Every structure is written in structure tokens, then in C-alpha cells.
Amino acid sequence: MDVTRQGRKDFFIKSNKNGVQSLGLYCPRNCLEENPHISRVIGTRIYSDKSSICRAAVHAGVLRNDLGGYIDVMPVDKRKNYIASHQNGISSER
């Protein structure tokens, strides 16, 4: 999944573009308090669908943990490998 936030919008709505449907999702604030063993983040910029959406959004820098908010999630082709990194206080897995 690709978690992005473009510009400063109050919220996102689902859309259909080029045959791909995105979803507008609300992430509650303080999602980093979720159990990190259950709420994994796999990847960098492009994340595995096994990742916690809210934690991946904080990792990507498109959402602040203390504020929460709406994000746009769009499915992309599955990858064999994901890149691990440490960003915004979260270590992702590969």
C-alpha cells in the first residue's frame, strides 16, 4: 500500500483513478501506543498490507501521532522485498 498525503487537506475521500480505488481512512491519535508486536510496519514509502496503516502513516511522515487524521491509502502491486528504515520514531521491517 502507498500511504500519502498531498497538500493540506482536512480529509480524503475514496476515489477511483486509472482503474485503482483508493480509500480515505481516519487514523485515531496516539496510535503508537498500540502494541508494536501486533502493529508492525513493513517497508518504507511503499508498505506491506500487513502493516498497521496508522503506524505506517506516522513512519512516512504524513500523519502526526499526537493529532491523528485522515490519510489516503491506495493499493499497489505486491513486492517481494520491502526496505526497512527508522523514521519519525518508528523502525520498520524489511
Image (cartoon, grey):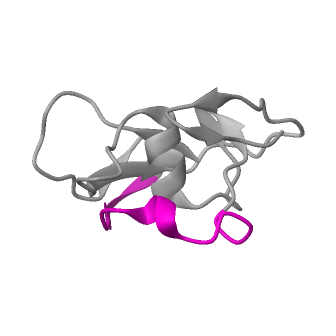
The reply to whether residue 19 is in sight is: no
The reply to whether the magenta stretch includes residue 87 is no
Q: Eyeballing the image, is 80 above or below 48?
A: above
Q: Residue at x 70, y 72 (%)?
A: 38
Q: Residue at x 31, y 36 (%)?
A: 5
Q: Eyeballing the image, is 56 above or below 52?
A: above
| x and y, in percent, of residue 14 in the image | 29, 59
Q: Residue at x 40, y 53 (%)?
A: 22
The reply to whether residue 77 is in sight is: yes
| x and y, in percent, of residue 71 in the image | 32, 51
Q: Name the residue nearer the viewer: 55 or 7.
A: 55
| x and y, in percent, of residue 7 in the image | 19, 27
Q: Eyeballing the image, is 89 above or below 27?
A: above
The reply to whether the magenta stretch includes residue 31 is yes
Range of residues picked out in magenta: 21-39
48 relative position to 74: left or right: right
Q: How many marks?
A: 0
82 relative position to 13: left or right: right
Q: Name the residue nearer the viewer: 30 or 7.
A: 30
Q: Eyeballing the image, is 30 above or below 4?
A: below
Q: Residue at x 52, y 53 (%)?
A: 55
| x and y, in percent, of residue 9 in the image | 12, 40
1 relative position to 28: left or right: right
69 relative position to 60: left or right: left
Farthest right residue?
Answer: 80
Q: Quadrant of the C terminus?
A: top right
